[in-house]
């Protein structure tokens, strides 16, 4: 299905910025593009409400406020601390789950991008798309956590190695971002995890370009959820390019 020609770093960089034009320059796509942000806000709100309630309830169970003034102060301090942790965990879960929950919208954007590029194919709806996306997301997350944790341990014991490990951390994170974005065009083609690994290995330079460009944009506060639909469009452009240029 895929060609043997290796796309390069520049193709990966250019694909992402092509995705910017596709999303920002097409008002008809704005509705689908806004879905991940809306889902993240809703999920964060729901998780936050539940976790904060649990933190308030749990603080009273840990410390009995009726024991005295200091116990009552301790309960309020504990509630504040647990509440902050609860909100952070809620935000993390909301952002993590926003991608698979928004899969229907991101799949549609990927299809639209293919049609605009002149690809006449209509990919059939794949059963279990949500669980596919969830599995792929957590696989990438596992790789990212393992890589960053390993590099952090090296930096801790050998501080001078930071000149190498810190850029490698960013690169590993960029690969995870690209892996997540490629989920949609590769998912439309029915590729499993192993086949995706092979595809990414065959086009490592282009995948690196896509991930590094996306990772750089993620450093800008507030662009995380806006980057998701843009990145999916860019990843689709990259996959289509790899097919058009096959030997």
Image (spheres, rainbow, N blue to C red):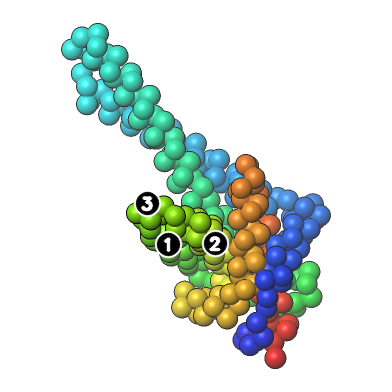
Considering the numbered disc 1 on the image, is that residue within a helix, a strand or a loop? helix
x and y, in percent, of residue 232 in the image: 64, 62
Q: Which mark is residue 171?
A: 2
Mark toward the start of the polypeptide (2 vs 3):
3
x and y, in percent, of residue 179 in the image: 54, 66
Q: Which mark is residue 33?
A: none
Kindly give the residue lying farthest to the left in the view shown: 67
Q: Is residue 33 left or right of residue 167?
A: right
Q: Nearer the viewer, mark 2 or mark 3?
A: 3
Label 1: which residue? 147
Rendered view: 118 above or below 92: below
C-alpha span from label 3 to label 1: 14 Å
Label 3: which residue? 156
Kindly give the residue lying farthest to the bottom in the view shown: 247
| Residue 101, visible in the rendered structure | no
Rendered view: 50 above or below 76: below
Does the CB distance between marks 2 and 3 fall below 8 Å?
no
Considering the numbered disc 2 on the image, is that residue within a helix, a strand or a loop? helix
Does the CB distance between marks 1 and 2 fall below 8 Å?
no
Q: Residue at x 50, y 70 (%)?
A: 127
């Amino acid at each position: 299905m895929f060609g043997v020609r290796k796309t390069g770093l520049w193709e990966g960089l250019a694909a992402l910025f092509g995705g910017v034009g596709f999303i920002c320059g097409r008002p008809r796509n704005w509705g689908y593009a806004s879905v991940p942000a809306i889902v993240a806000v809703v999920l964060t709100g729901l998780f936050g409400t539940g976790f904060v309630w649990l933190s308030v309830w749990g603080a009273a169970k840990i410390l009995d406020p009726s024991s005295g003034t200091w116990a009552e102060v301790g309960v309020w301090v504990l509630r504040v601390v647990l509440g902050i942790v609860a909100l952070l965990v809620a935000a993390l879960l909301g952002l993590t789950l926003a991608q698979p929950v928004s899969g229907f919208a991101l799949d549609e954007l990927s299809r639209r991008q293919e049609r605009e590029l002149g690809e006449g194919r209509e990919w059939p709806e794949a059963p279990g798309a949500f669980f596919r996306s969830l599995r792929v997301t957590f696989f990438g997350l596992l790789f990212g956590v393992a890589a960053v944790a390993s590099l952090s341990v090296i930096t801790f014991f050998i501080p001078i190695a930071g000149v190498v490990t810190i850029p490698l951390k960013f690169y590993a994170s960029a690969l995870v971002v690209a892996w997540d974005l490629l989920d949609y065009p590769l998912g439309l083609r029915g590729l499993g995890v192993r086949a995706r690994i092979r595809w990414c290995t065959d086009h490592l330079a282009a995948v690196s370009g896509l991930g590094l460009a996306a990772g750089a944009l993620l450093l800008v506060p507030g662009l995380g959820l806006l980057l998701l639909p843009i990145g999916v469009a860019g990843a689709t452009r990259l996959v289509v390019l790899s097919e058009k240029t096959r030997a």
